[in-house]
Amino acid sequence: MSMLDASFTQQAGCLGSDLNTQSSSFGSCFSVKQHQIDQAIMTREDEHRKQEIDALLSEAMNNLTFEERQEQQDILHGVDNEIKEETTFVDKALRELDAHLIREKAGSVYEIAERMNPAYVNSKAFRIMFLRGNRYDTKASANQMIRFFEVKQQLFGNDKLAKDITIDDLDDDDR
């Protein structure tokens, strides 16, 4: 039975036993059933559009070379444009990161952490983690480092600000 047939069959149950009930029940049943019919029609139109789009995309992908298709897959999965981490590139990014941090850190929690444990905060591996996470955007990396220490202070306090958090640092409910 189609959606339309089911709709009309169910409407028969909307009719009441007397004339007054019939008019009020039928009116509300009709509006509900009309909505269901509209929704079914919209779904068929949407399904048709989806099939057209899928066919167009499939055809476009099939017309690509293997390398082009692979590149599109990489973009889709967020692994495109691998950054070559050559020593000169990384060193330049670290210098730029330092320059941004010097401008931004005044009065921040980052500055407190740096005074507490400069080896931890200025560690090359620690800084590269932020650079990689921001695809070597040095300004974004500097801002993220500052926010990192602000959130870390809120969650764990100053005692654990300038050290790695371990499982022992968590409360029982957080484990």
Image (tube, helix red, strand yellow):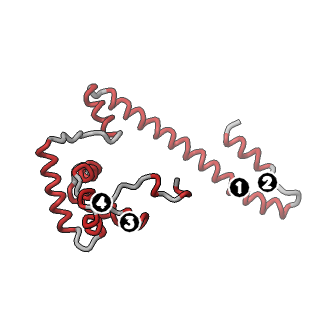
143 or 62: nearer the viewer: 143
98 or 35: nearer the viewer: 98
Q: Mark 1 points at which residue?
A: 30
Q: Which amino acid does label 4 sit on?
A: Gln
Which residue is rendered at x = 14% and y = 49% of the image?
Answer: 91
Q: Disc 4 on helix, strand or loop?
A: helix
Mark 3 or mark 1: name the one nearer the start of the chain: 1
Q: Where is residue 136? Give x, y as percent.
A: 22, 50
49 to 139, vertically: above or below: above
Q: What is the spatial separation of the Cα atoms under label 4 and label 3, in whole angstroms?
A: 21 Å
How crowded is the residue under tag 2: few (<14 C-alpha within 10 Å), some, or many (20+)?
some
Q: In which quarter of the image is the N terminus?
A: top right
Q: What is the spatial separation of the Cα atoms under label 1 and label 4, in whole angstroms?
A: 57 Å
Q: Disc 2 on helix, strand or loop?
A: loop
Mark 2 or mark 4: name the one nearer the start of the chain: 2
Which residue is rendered at x = 28% and y = 25% of the image?
Answer: 66
174 sits to left or right of 32:
left
Mark 4 or mark 3: name the one nearer the start of the chain: 4
Mark 1 or mark 2: name the one nearer the start of the chain: 2
Q: Mark 2 points at which residue?
A: 14
| Marks 3, 1: nearer the viewer | 3
Q: Mark 4 points at which residue?
A: 144
